[in-house]
Amino acid sequence: MKSKELAPFNNLVDAFAAMPGIGEKSALKLAYHIVSEGSYDGMKLSHAIEQAVESIQRCRKCNNLSQDELCHICSDELRDRTKLCLVESAKDILTIEKLGQYKGLYYVLSDIDTFDLVHLRDALKGVNELIFAFAPSIASDTMMLYIESQLEDMNLQFTKIAQGVPTGISLDSVDTLSLARAIEDRVSI
Ligand SMILES: [Zn+2]
């Protein structure tokens, strides 16, 4: 299938295939669509990618995706600044925000192995409840215990989202009703 003459096409297939959740077959289908009949779609996609890559950064305070130094949640004065929800990925913020029920702040623990404790402590100023919204797993339990032990002196109430979120799957795969209930029924740890 792959020939030298079609190098740009093959590069496009490879670029799609490198994306999470896109297999070789879908990559081929997308690339084929773009070069054969979807040149407008292709240009639109290329422009959107360029704009997103150039303009989206990490929020200085919570590591959420943001167009500005502070994300729209950190800069929203109406959010409840006494609650902070710790998530494993900025994607989880999108999932929880879609439920429209949680009104506190967030913090993305982007790299679990090397996260910056001083930075997290800074984000926790004024907060009195720290909610762990991790997908249940042994690793996340260990992480919760570790973080709790490191923040012992901060006088925080530690809670986690309730059981009902199945073990081993990411939050964006949980149905919205279960996730909404899990946040509502969070338990002290
Ligand atoms: Zn933020």
Image (spheres, rainbow, N blue to C red):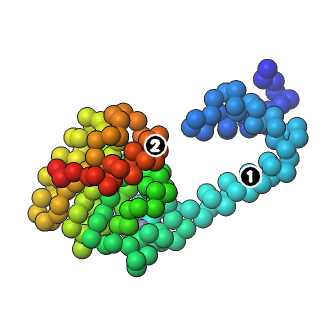
- Residue 101: image tag: none
Question: Marks 2 and 1: which is nearer the front?
Answer: 2
Residue furthest right as drawn: 37
Give neighbour class at mark 2: few <14, some 14-19, many 20+ (Cα, 10 Å).
Answer: few
Residue drawn 67% across and 37% down?
16
Q: Mark 2 points at which residue?
A: 175
Q: Which amino acid does label 2 sit on?
A: Asp
* Residue 78 figure quarter: bottom left
- In the image, what residue occupies the spot 35% across and 50% down? 181
Where does residue 186 sit, x and y in percent of width and height?
26, 52
Percent x, y of residue 45: 74, 51
Identify the image quadrant of residue 157.
Answer: bottom left
Residue 176 in sight from this viewpoint: yes
Q: Is residue 84 left or right of residue 57?
A: left
**Residue 133 visible (yes or no):** no
For label 1, the crowd category at 10 Å Cα-Cα, with few meaning under 14, some 14 to 19 and many 20 or more, is few
Most foreground residue, 78 or 17: 78
Gap between marks 2 and 1, in whole Å? 32 Å
Q: What type is the residue that disc 1 sits on?
A: Ser
Tag 2 secondary structure: loop
Residue positioned 44% across, 69% down in the render: 73
User: Which residue is label 1 attached to?
Assistant: 46
| Label 2 within 8 A of ligand 1 by Cβ | no
Q: Nearer the viewer, residue 121 or 94?
A: 94
Q: Which residue lies furthest to the bottom in this view?
A: 77
Figure check: 117 above or below 139: below
Of the four image quadrants, the one with ligand 1 is bottom left
